Image (cartoon, rainbow, N blue to C red):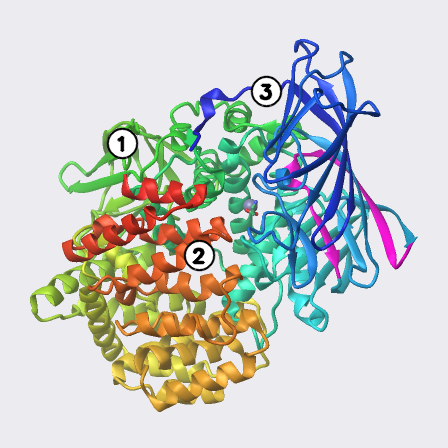
Amino acid sequence: GQVVRLDEYRPSDYLIDATHLTFRLDPERTHVTARLTVRRREGVAAGTPLSLDGDGLSFKGARINGEAAGDNAVSATPDALTINEPPDGETFTLEIETVVDPTANTQLMGLYRTSGNYCTQCEAEGFRRITYFLDRPDILSVYTVRIEGDRKDTPLLLSNGNPVEQGELGDGRHFAVWHDPHPKPSYLFALFAGSLGVVEDSFTTASGRKVDLRIHVEQGKEARAAYAMDALKRSMAWDEERFGREYDLDIFQIVAVSDFNMGAMENKGLNIFNDKYVLADPETATDQDYASIEAIIAHEYFHNWTGNRITCRDWFQLCLKEGLTVFRDQEFSADMRSRAVKRISDVRVLRAHQFPEDAGPLAHPVRPKTYKEINNFYTATVYEKGAEIVRMLRTMLGEAGFSAGMDLYFARHDGQAATIEQFLACFAEATDTDLGQFALWYEQPGTPNLSIGARYDADARMLTVTVDQALRPPVAGASSAPLHIPVAFGLVGPDGADMALGEVEGAAITQHPGEDAVMHITAPRHLIVFSGIEVPPVLSVLRGFSAPVTRVPHASVADRAFLARHDGDPFSRWEALNSLVMDELKAATGAARTGAEIAASATLTESVAALAGDSELDNAYRALCLTLPGEADIAREIGHDIDPDAIHVARRAISAQLSKACERVLARVYHELQPRRAYDPGAEGAGRRALRNVALTLLCHAAGSTDLAERALAAADNMTDRAHALTVLAHLAPDSEAARRGLDAFRTAFRAEPIVLDKWFTMQATVPRHETVETVQALTRAPGFSWDNPNRIRALVGAFATGNPVAFNRPDGKGYELLTGAIGRIDGANPQVAARLMTAMRSWRNLERGRRQRAEAAITALGRKAHLSRDLKDIIERTLA
Ligand code: BAL
Ligand code: ZN
């Protein structure tokens, strides 16, 4: 395939100032007319050919300045339209007619059908599947869109911007015209036509503009959009308060559809959502679902400024909008809920998804330098590591400096397609800071490792800290120069309070008012000396996880147990505990492989019990302290020669021992947190349920029995508790009559609710035992499963491959074959979903030898199949490279 390179970027010869689109909707033959106002860029020679992108288009004709273009004037293929000799004038109009078949569009890119409705998805390069265009994000155009459709089938005719006109056409057809005054790139174009219910509300902006808010969902499910609407209004208010950003159209709409490749899409004024991230009520959605809805509604809304008003110059700059917008949605959720809990959850996600990506064959810089298929770069690295880079800026510059940089960015680049260099320049200028070395975070793949040592000299009253940074290039040819790493830290005194830092030499230290001190690690090795330190402190580093690095714990077990009790930073308390648990889980895995005894230490059980029983702490936080690292987390920390069965045995054993040791605390917690009030999806109620449910899991482990889960299932009056209890039951006693009955009842209750039934598929796909391979095979034939719907595929096959290390890595390789078989089946219809599923095998080289060979054989066999999509081929080639 063809490689696209960042260093080959050049501006286009032509611009498209205005785009008038007319859609005559038809299920199989939708006519699209595009009337473009084309302008030759200054300095480009008159007559320079204009080549427009297409993808599988059926060309019907073109007119140039109103005249039909003759055969020699244009060359059309399904994938390109070239105007061989454009008119000499500076501007001209180009009218293009194409026909597309939305019903045959199974890729869910371009214009397609979902539940009988019409819907579009254009990011990254889907617009070219609708009409020929300069389909690149630096072409900003003002869109006017006319949609004509059948009134009965498509009462709703929606596009971006504000409504202009609507009316009847006769023959049962009608039309609507929309105009979006904000110039935008083609990837932000959207159209929806169909029949849906609506929830309406309004929001008045800080400057007094009233904005109509509409969320369109399947008829009969309007009540389930109430939480999404509430989250939207909170997002709008928050962006005004925190970033000074107001909404800029008369109307903001969200449409929920059932067939969608991504979570949602930020099209200007018309967000299109996977319905799983809109619909919620207590009976059908878990607390996690509510939290995801809140975050994604916010994320797409925040894109209006970070992505839409200021967009990306080219797709290499994807992190410019995604990393920044993820940072913004993380901050929003932190303000809406518990900041510490949000941070810990985000770090767990980063470690689970981004770290393995960054350590394996699919590693790439946050801003890639080349790609073959841009769809494969909507990754955890671009999104989550991209957000960490923005967070590091925030940590280094402090709240005031960061705000000044953001304000300059909005002021300077509004209406532009920008680059990472331009973004960083705003912070450098606003705060007079050199960000030259810091910029390497965007350039170099891989997770840096910090080795930290601390030694206190009582006689000299000195603390000496050594910090070594190392970056192992994960892919051939990647550079690994030292990075600028902000390490937030504190010196914790014997009483648990932070001590004064005294004189410091060996690294630049900054401290912004009300924030933790930060040491700026810029060299491969720093020797940092704190003098005038009267009593031995415990060094607390990477507070708030101030940089996305791995680290060798420097502190002794006793010091980490101390930090778990006393660190002033709640993230670091959790982290100290987590590192103690991880050490024991790793040791237990080694023991499981040799048959040696597994024993959790008293220090660990006491530390866990102390945090779990501390009612001063937030319930959600205590729940996180009681949540053991997952099997995939343990595998990642072990790193090589991985035996997933041994990890499973070790984790179960440690969990059972910890639970037994903490049984009294757990029982008390479980009893005290009986639901007393009606379900409320807010942070407080969710925290109570989280703590109670983790206690339930552990009590079942301690007892070696699922009685309590059975009772909890019977008593559950909301989906959070029901799904949790049933999962515990199905995972601990998969062959029991109670599990079978529970699963049957769940299916019966929710058989008409696909996104709820997805939970039923996932619970069974994640039962941690080898037989699950056959269960998943059988479930692909169960009523309710469909190979055509991305959510179904992810809930069953995706959950199996990414959430069930034991079954997926079955020693005979049947788990790998299940996955590659599924991918081979999906690829022809939906390459994006197929390629994404394939990433589940990126860490195959870390497995023990037998599994490694079987994994490689399965990937290789799939790679040999004929007619693989470019998306899938790209992932397979890189995975095997
Ligand atoms: N832009 C694709 C979906 C999202 O990140 O919001
Ligand atoms: Zn986004």
In the rendered image, which quarter is residue 143 located in? top right
Amino acid, disc 2: Ala
Residue linked to disc 1:
476
SS category of the residue bearing label 1: loop
Badge 2 residue CB within 8 Å of ligand 2: no
Q: Nearer the viewer, mark 3 or mark 2?
A: 3
On screen, residue 500 versus residue 181, left or right, reads: left
**Does residue 204 appear in this view?**
no
Q: Which residues are magenta?
A: 170-194
Which residue is the extreme one toward the front? Answer: 71
Rendered-image quadrant of the C terminus: top left
Residue 817 place in picture, x, y as percent:
30, 60
Q: Answer above or below: position of 715 versus 610.
A: below
Q: Earlier in the sequence, mark 3 or mark 2?
A: 3
Residue linked to disc 3:
11
Q: Nearer the viewer, mark 2 or mark 1?
A: 1
What secondary structure predominates along the stretch shown in magenta?
strand
Amino acid, disc 3: Pro
Report if the CB atoms under discs 1 and 3 are less than 8 Å apart. Answer: no
Residue sitting at x 30%, y 27%: 479
Residue 388 place in picture, x, y as percent:
43, 42
**Does residue 186 appear in this view?**
yes
